[in-house]
Amino acid sequence: MWNPTTKRLAVLRANGCVLCDGKARIRRGLANIRNATGFDAARDVGRFAPRYTRISPATP
């Protein structure tokens, strides 16, 4: 009952999703990294200058 074409389609569909989603996923990953570093920077800055917060435009 096993059909190689369905498996190939599933693999292609998975790869296609990865390729279609690649930019968004990379962008999301960069955004997550940026948010994490921004949060850390804001936390560090907040230790010295309390007026800077994470939502402040002054944070990177």
Image (tube, helix red, strand yellow):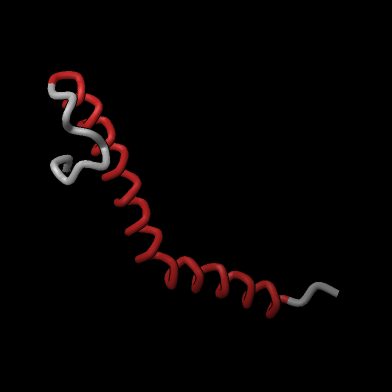
- Give 47 or 2, whichever is nearer the viewer: 47
- Residue drawn at x 28%, y 35% is 39
Residue 20 is left or right of residue 50, and the answer is right
- Give 39 or 1, whichever is nearer the viewer: 39
> x, y (%) of residue 34?
26, 45
- Residue drawn at x 20%, y 31% is 41
> x, y (%) of residue 45?
16, 26
> x, y (%) of residue 13?
57, 74
Q: In which quarter of the image is residue 42?
A: top left
Residue 54 is left or right of residue 6, and the answer is left
> x, y (%) of residue 36?
31, 38
- Image height of 33 relative to 51, above or below: below
Instruction: Specify the quadrant that holds the N terminus.
Output: bottom right
Instruction: Specify the quadrant that holds the C terminus.
Output: top left
- Give 21 or 54, whichever is nearer the viewer: 54
- Residue drawn at x 20%, y 25% is 46
- Image height of 21 relative to 60, above or below: below
